[in-house]
Image: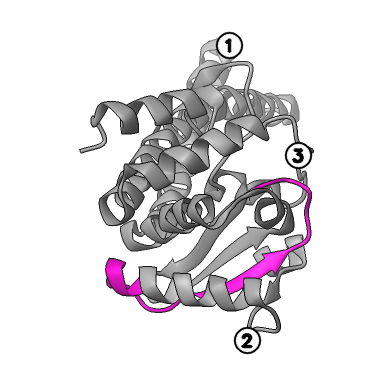
Amino acid sequence: MAKTAYGIQSITKPTNATERWLIQRVRELSSRFDIGMPEVGIYQSPEPNAFATGWNKNNALVAVSSGLIDNMNEEELNGVLGHELAHIANGDMVTMTLIQGVVNTFVIFFARIAAFMVSQFFRGNDEEDSPMTGFAYYGIAIVFEILFGILASIIVMWFSRRREFKADQGAADQLGPRYMINALRKLELLSGAPVDTRGKSFSPMKISGSNQFFALFASHPPLNKRIEKLQTGSWK
């Protein structure tokens, strides 16, 4: 799905110095994180970003945008790759999927219960079911699903933000905080770059997310907060 959404070209045989460097660094970092060598790919996008996906730590994909490669030096790219490999080592892709699935199940379950209670309350003493009663029940259920879904997304995004701090920490542990700090600073400078709107479901997997009006619904913490944690040593 990720390959299709972004048109990712996997690097099977490096054809230039950049591709050779990417493969070499990912292989070295994979060894440090004690995970299998992931598939490495590049996708064409002006957005400076990267993400990791895959179903386990020994079968994953790391994708880097052309916009990131064009705007970052090797030290900054090292920080980004370390961050993505930390996501893989932490099993974040599977964890996020499971959490989203569990939360969605609870949303549907409680929406049905709430809809039943409301429909029974308005039904009163009328024991005779009517088509309108069933229609009202499903209409109320949809409303509750929307409301509970909004609340559930706050929980999922809270976990996503914690996941980002943890990946920053993983990269800092392996490379030193300087690499991650410099990478995040460069992302701050590039914050005005175009946003890639393809594959929105993969946005939480990226190293940098778009700004949200409400912080509770943001999949990523503010870049300055992430830098601050690394600078103060609270990432330890």
Disc 2 residue type?
A: Thr
Give the residue at mark 2: 12
Q: Quadrant of residue 61?
A: bottom right
The residue sitting at the left extreme is 236
Residue at image point 50% right, 34% down: 220
Mark 1 or 3: the one toward you: 3
- Kindly tell me whether residue 99 is visible in this rendering: yes
Q: Earlier in the sequence, mark 1 or mark 3?
A: 1
Q: What residue did someone put label 3 on?
A: 195
Determine which residue is flagged by label 1: 122
| Rendered location of residue 69, percent (x, y) | 66, 57
42 vs 233: above or below: below
Number of numbered discs overlaid on the protein picture: 3
Under mark 3, the amino acid is: Val
* Res. 151 visible in picture: no
Report the span colored magenta. Answer: 30-48
